[in-house]
């Protein structure tokens, strides 16, 4: 065994020994290409565990800088990182965790102009955004491009997740056909969230992605998972294709 493969074997052996993974499954994980949209709470959690699992190429797009108020939930960053670009520090942290992977940082905001070209280099998209316009943009572009993506959102003590595979199940617009009116949407700085919540929902997104790469288990296709941290309840609800959906049925 070469020195490189010996190191890989040691790093991933707790995954190798799983019958659902094995050597071929680990190779699939190492070959996966994942784009994280957002490097905040969800992106920190999902990115950390995808990097640790050995996802070979991780792209991160975010144009924000780190603020002190982020540190309560965004575990990729430290106190002395305040004022620095999130994607640069996220790249540093993930490559420090696992030098076996490649991390690309895009210090930019996702737009209708840059998203189609950006996702060409990735197999899967993880929606770690924190605003409605970006969520609907991710949905609409991924549906057109037939790119699987993994939706997650958090607020207060509640979170939700759904796996969207265009052509195999409903999309985000089937669940929520249109965003709330602007006057109904609170500014992000006034929206509270308990710090642990993005960690849990981000891990669920990462778990769904790894299951899809491996072809194992049941995915949240056509199902939205709701989590209430106060009651510690997980509830799944069926989401049906909307026959007049403006995205997946157009």
Image (cartoon, rainbow, N blue to C red):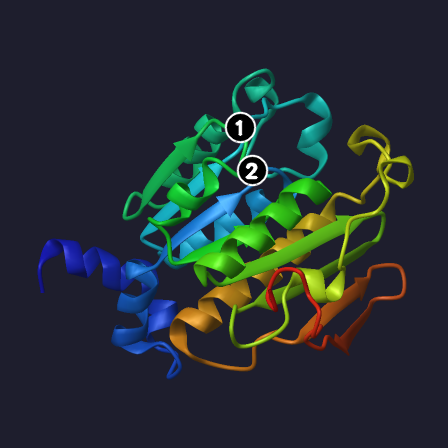
- Mark 2 residue element: loop
In the rendered view, does 98 fall on the left or right side of 176? Answer: left
Q: Is residue 239 above or below residue 30?
A: below
Residue topped by disc 2: 39
Q: Quadrant of residue 152?
A: bottom right
Q: Distance of mark 1 from mark 2, alpha carbons?
A: 6 Å
In terms of depth relative to the viewer, which is nearer, 63 or 232?
A: 63
Q: Is residue 87 above or below residue 17?
A: above
For residue 130, say whether it is visible.
no
Residue 208 image offset from top left, x and y in percent: 54, 68
Q: Quadrant of residue 214?
A: bottom left
Q: Residue at x 22, y 56 (%)?
A: 7
For residue 111, say whether it is visible.
yes
Residue 79 image offset from top left, x and y in percent: 61, 22
Crowding at label 1, few (<14), some or many (≥20) Cα neighbours within 10 Å? Answer: many
Residue topped by disc 1: 86
In the rendered view, does 170 fall on the left or right side of 61? Answer: right
In the rendered view, does 4 fall on the left or right side of 97? Answer: left
Q: Earlier in the sequence, mark 1 or mark 2?
A: 2
- Mark 1 residue element: helix
Q: Is residue 211 above or below residue 137?
A: below
Point out the residue furthest to the left here. Answer: 2
Mark 1 in CB contact with mark 2 (< 8 angstroms): yes
Q: Quadrant of residue 169?
A: bottom right
Residue 63 image offset from top left, x and y in percent: 55, 26
């Amino acid at each position: 065994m070469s020195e490189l493969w010996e190191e890989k074997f040691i790093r991933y052996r707790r995954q190798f020994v799983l019958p659902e993974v094995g050597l071929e499954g680990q190779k699939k994980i190492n070959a996966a290409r994942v784009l994280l949209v957002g490097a905040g709470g969800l992106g920190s959690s999902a990115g950390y565990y995808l990097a640790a699992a050995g996802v070979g190429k991780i792209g991160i797009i975010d144009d924000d800088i780190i603020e002190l108020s982020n540190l309560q939930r965004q575990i990729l960053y430290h106190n002395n990182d305040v004022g620095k670009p999130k994607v640069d520090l996220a790249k540093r942290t993930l490559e420090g965790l696992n030098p076996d992977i490649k991390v690309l940082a895009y210090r930019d905001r996702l737009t209708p102009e840059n998203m189609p070209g950006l996702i060409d280099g990735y197999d899967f998209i993880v929606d770690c955004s924190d605003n409605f316009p970006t969520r609907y943009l991710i949905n609409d572009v991924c549906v057109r491009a037939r790119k699987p993506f993994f939706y997650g959102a958090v607020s207060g003590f509640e979170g939700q997740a759904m796996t969207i595979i265009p052509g195999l199940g409903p999309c985000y617009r089937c669940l929520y056909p249109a965003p709330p009116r602007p006057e109904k949407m609170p500014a992000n700085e006034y929206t509270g969230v308990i710090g642990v919540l993005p960690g849990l929902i981000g891990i669920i997104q990462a778990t769904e992605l790894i299951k899809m790469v491996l072809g194992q288990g049941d995915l949240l296709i056509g199902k939205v998972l709701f989590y209430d941290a106060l009651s510690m309840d997980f509830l799944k609800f069926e989401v049906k294709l909307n026959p007049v959906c403006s995205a997946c049925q157009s």
